[in-house]
Amino acid sequence: MQIRTRSSKFFLALVALGALISGASAMVAQEAARPWMDPKLSPEERAEMVLKQLTLDEKLALLHGNGMAHEKWWTMPLTQFANGGAGYVEGIPRLGIPPLIMSDAAYGVRDSAANGRYSTAMPSNLGAASSWDPDAACAYGTVIGQELRAQGFDMTLGGGVDLVREPRNGRTFEYTGEDPLLAGTMDGSMMKCEQAQHVVGDIKHYVMNDQETGRNFVSAILSKKALQESDLLAFHIAISIANPGAIMCSYNRINGDYACENPYTLHDVLKESWGFKGFVLSDWGGTHSTVAASAAGLDQEQPMANFFGPKLKEAVAAGQVPLAEIDDHARRVLYAEFLSGIVDDPPQTSVVDVVKGLETAQRVEEESIVLLKNDGAILPIDPSRVHSIAIVGGHADLGMISGGGSAQVDAPGGNAVADQGKGGKGRTHWHENVWFRTSPLEALQAKLPNTKIVFDPGTDPKSAAALASKSDLAIVFAYQWESEGMDLASLSLSADQNALIEQVAAANPHTIVVLESGTAVTMPWIDRVAGVVEAWYAGSSGHKALAGVLAGEVNPSGKLPITFPKDENDLPHPVIPSAPPRDPATDMGNRAALPKNYTVNYNEGAEAGYKWFEAEHKQPLFPFGFGLSYTSYEYSGLSVDSAARTVRFTVANTGKRAGAEIAEVYAQLPQGADESSYKRLVGWKRISLAAGASETVVIPIDSRVLATFDEAHNNWSFAPGDYGVFVGGSSDSTPLTGILQIR
Ligand code: BGC
């Protein structure tokens, strides 16, 4: 009996071993049959090997989307596999190539609640850019990348880096500012770390999608030189840092040609000159042709197959699109899959690390809040002197607002403010004003337990003013909501919020305004308030970060990534030219139905943002790079090493608190070079300093922003001569000056 049992165990073990061996040898055989699965090979080699195995139909399947979850008019049979996300591209299962499962993810993963999932909202992209901290941007991208994977996505549609030329653009909060070096560095750092989590990275909207008005047909007019030295430069810097798998071309036209069929921007610049090896996908409905778009360099239509489905196959059959072009498109998609790691490590759905997300969101926001005004050191709140605080308006009892459109992250627990739109249950409506359940009132109460803090909704300014008048301090919360698909009529807060601020400030000179905005705000009341704090769209832990700043646990260190004008009349375009209506009955890709003659002439050329203000000698309300601290800094000892193209100087913390100073370096082209009238940001460093401490830093000058583009010869050069160098804590406060010689 025993012997029999033993022998049957032995037999079973033999069977198991046999199965293992045959399983392993099957794997070995599969590996041998799939040599592209060897991660030691380069993404290029691997993509090439797979490409050789593909049928024409398999190649073509990589070149279009299959609908968009939640959009009835954009549904196809395979949309059901989109995981509730914005886009789905079939994989090639027989060869181990996974599908592309895409989600929007500008400041967090979109469409979570409707799918029964959770995602963290980071501060808005513009908010995070105010930290000027590439490490914070990396942490930001890391969280988003991890949450995408945990939710089953393997491609992000985040990464907006269009320059903020037009601060009323409803998507300003999704972008990283008005300066090519800052915007490109921050966006590139976010996307580099997001893609490092093994999701295909994306940078968008390429290029000049600088306003939402008429975005599907507007033609942005500016010279190639200006384009190269401004918006394209921001993209180039971001792409060179992130090396993303994908670039999304934009809805608009550039100098007449649609961005998704623009031979200059797609072929000549992105692919030829910059050597971009990933794929270009169209913005949703931004494809307008088959042959022209394919030839210009569009690789993948999204979210449908109107032009790159059967029509592309027909064009191939008719010899209008060469097979080599199809190979190039497909190779690029495959390359992006190998580059990003999604072939070797496809996403595994898992529980999102909520704590990590919230901690990162808080840390980034703490670095991003910008203290704009602080008369008489009214902040931080000193509880030994301030015994009562009136908190007024902005739904501060309930939460903080977020940016809308395709960037919208669903608020966990739903919208904190009822009746704010048509959203209702489930999916957040495209233009719903969404407040996260992050009450700054509660967060401040937690920080100041012995202070009497009373809330007034601000709906009746008289009652708010009465409360303010009997409080030691008043804090008015004001918001300015914005979203994709709209532009702001002006940078002003709503009239009732402006009136509320005036009345509260009249009742109590110790009034502080906290702004929750996606862009610059004009402030007619600025002289009558003691303090202004810009919190941006603050994300899932924004209330805690803000309370930390107000109570002084956190020393504010953010600096503006965009200029705040006094008045819209000071902008290059005092008003956004109104656009003819689009025929909503037609498909967005149908160019015949789109108005043809709507243009915006960017006559200011490369002078976006502070460069315009400086060149035009206009004084802004708050300049680019500006932000106060609870301590003070002193700059000294500048030396410029022209050969090494570096600057060296010392920053001292001369106050009583530890803090972080963003030291900014600007340079101005030599006299005689054509753009001598403004200076450009060429480098910066965030320096943490204990009270009384000082540090000598060496900062490289980024030559890319000093070179000028020669349109006739299609190349870059440096104007020889003496470049002015300016160092300080803001674009309009540069106590140190020097000379950089380029011969
Ligand atoms: C937006 C893109 C977005 C896409 C998918 C478009 O409307 O412009 O930024 O990624 O929709 O949601």
Image (cartoon, grey):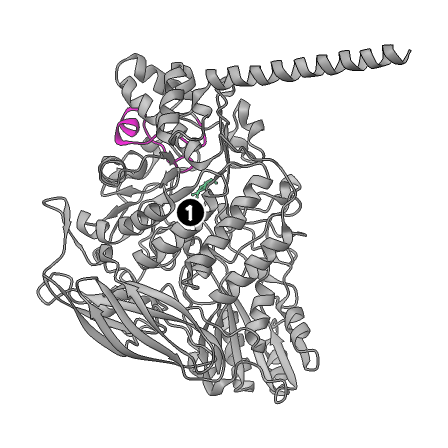
Question: Is residue 298 within the magenta segment?
Answer: yes
Which residue occupies the foreground of this view, 647 or 671? 647
Q: Quadrant of residue 704?
A: bottom left
Q: Image height check: is 128 above or below 467?
A: above
Q: Image height check: is 739 above or below 122?
A: below
379 relative to 281 in the view: left or right: right
Q: Which residue is mark 1?
A: 192
Residue 555, how many percent across, how many down?
A: 50, 75
Residue at position x 62%, y 37% in the image: 349
Question: Magenta span covers which residues?
Answer: 282-304
Dot 1 lies on which element? helix
Q: Quadrant of residue 274?
A: top left
Residue at position x 51%, y 36% in the image: 154
Residue at position x 65%, y 84% in the image: 388
- Specify whether residue 252 is in view: yes
Residue 507, how many percent across, how many down?
A: 56, 86
Quadrant location, the N terminus: top right
419 relative to 109 in the view: left or right: right
Quadrant location, the C terminus: bottom left
How crowded pointer 1 is (Cα within 10 Å; few <14, some 14-19, many 20+) is rated as many
Q: Image height check: is 581 above or below 699?
A: above
Q: Amino acid at mark 1?
A: Lys
